[in-house]
Image (cartoon, rainbow, N blue to C red):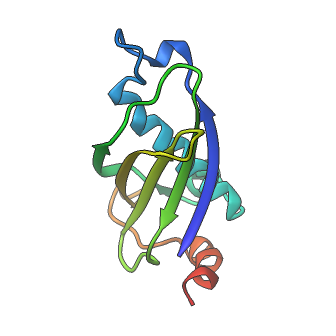
Amino acid sequence: MFSSITTIRVRYGETDQMGYLYYGNYGLYYEVGRAEAIRELGFSYRELEEQGVIMPVAELNVKYLRPAYYDDLITVKTILKELPKSSRIQFHSELYNEKGELLNVGVTTLVFIDVKTKQKAGLPEALKERLEPFFK
């Protein structure tokens, strides 16, 4: 299993009229977590794209447990529970407030796509090499 942690402060413009973090912004927080997790592995989305692989989102599932509020410092935990065996990769996300309370959970499924052919591709070899030690 591979996991990564990053933090994000809820900005005023990300809240709704009730003062809650707007529900549509949770996916953006997941994306920040994914990007930082990939960076921890020594890559970036840009580098993967330069290697000819893009990763569009195929599915997003979200469960809201508690609200986040303006100026809360949110901990985003991003988890890969298994090494991808096909063209899909699943990132599990958990968002916590400063009290350590679980606010939100989600699963984002992305697909590896060859940028030239626009067809499904497998897990890039360089990324696989970085991930394998976490799954032994």
Name which quarter of the figure residue 92 lies in.
Answer: bottom left
Left or right: 96, with 106 as reference point: right
Compared to residue 81, the image places residue 32 above or below, namely above
Name which quarter of the figure residue 11 lies in.
Answer: top right
| Residue 130 on image: x %, y % | 65, 75
Q: Residue at x 43, y 59 (%)?
A: 91
Q: Is residue 95 visible?
A: yes
Closest to the observer, 135 or 103: 103
| Furthest-bottom residue in this view | 136
Number of callouts in the render? 0
| Residue 118 on image: x %, y % | 35, 55
Q: Residue at x 41, y 29 (%)?
A: 25
| Residue 108 on image: x %, y % | 36, 53
| Furthest-top residue in this view | 17
| Residue 67 on image: x %, y % | 39, 31
Compared to residue 41, the image places residue 132 above or below, namely below
Name which quarter of the figure residue 47 lies in.
Answer: bottom right
Left or right: 133, with 116 as reference point: right
Closest to the observer, 70 or 8: 70
Q: Residue at x 48, y 23 (%)?
A: 69
Q: Is residue 115 visible?
A: no
Name the quadrant of the C terminus. Answer: bottom right
